[in-house]
């Protein structure tokens, strides 16, 4: 999915947060020991994408394309650092940790914009 404006980006991020809550809620009923790990994985992906969207689409100016490219690179690098720090915190703080739920829901939420474009 190609995101072209602020409104569309925020809609995608909102959908990611909703999907995180939905998947975590289902896991809370089916397998309660995995729910907190799933919630953490989804929140990591959603928060990182929200950060990226706010940074890139916050004050957009088409008159300066070189600044936009610099913002894209800066936002992506910072997003990767944020994801690493949040994963490290999740691994240290969540007891018991379910790695499959953590990374599985992270991957699902991270790939959600692409999956939305297929449907």
Image (cartoon, grey):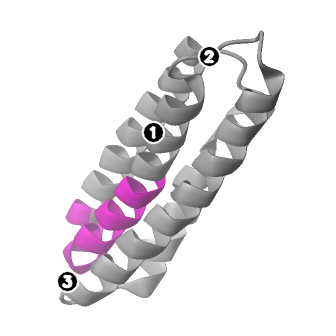
Q: Seen in the image, is 47 located left or right of residue 31? A: right
From the top left corner, tell me how far across and down residue 94 is, in percent. 21, 82
> Which secondary structure, mark 1?
helix
Q: Residue 8 appears in which quarter of the rendering?
A: top right
Residue 1 visible within the image: no
> What is the C-alpha distance between the residues marked 3 and 2?
37 Å
> Which secondary structure, mark 2?
loop
Q: Residue 92 appears in which quarter of the rendering?
A: bottom left
From the top left corner, tell me how far across and down residue 17 is, in percent. 38, 40
Q: Earlier in the sequence, mark 3 or mark 2?
A: 2
Check residue 81 for magenta coloring. no
Q: Which contiguous range is marked in magenta?
A: 28-45
Residue wearing tag 3: 93
Q: Quadrant of the N terminus?
A: top right
Q: Earlier in the sequence, mark 3 or mark 1?
A: 1
Residue 60, label in figure:
2
Q: Nearer the viewer, mark 1 or mark 2?
A: 2
Residue wearing tag 1: 50
Q: Name which residue lies at 57% across and 64% down.
A: 80
């Amino acid at each position: 999915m190609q995101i072209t404006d602020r409104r569309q980006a925020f809609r995608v991020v909102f959908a990611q947060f909703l999907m995180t809550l939905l998947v975590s809620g289902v896991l809370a009923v089916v397998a309660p020991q995995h729910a907190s790990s799933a919630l953490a994985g989804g929140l990591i992906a959603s928060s990182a994408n929200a950060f990226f969207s706010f940074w890139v689409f916050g004050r957009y100016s088409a008159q300066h394309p070189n600044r936009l490219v610099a913002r894209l690179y800066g936002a992506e690098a910072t997003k990767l650092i944020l994801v690493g720090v949040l994963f490290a915190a999740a691994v240290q703080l969540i007891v018991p940790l379910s790695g499959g739920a953590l990374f599985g829901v992270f991957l699902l939420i991270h790939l959600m914009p692409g999956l939305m474009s297929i449907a």
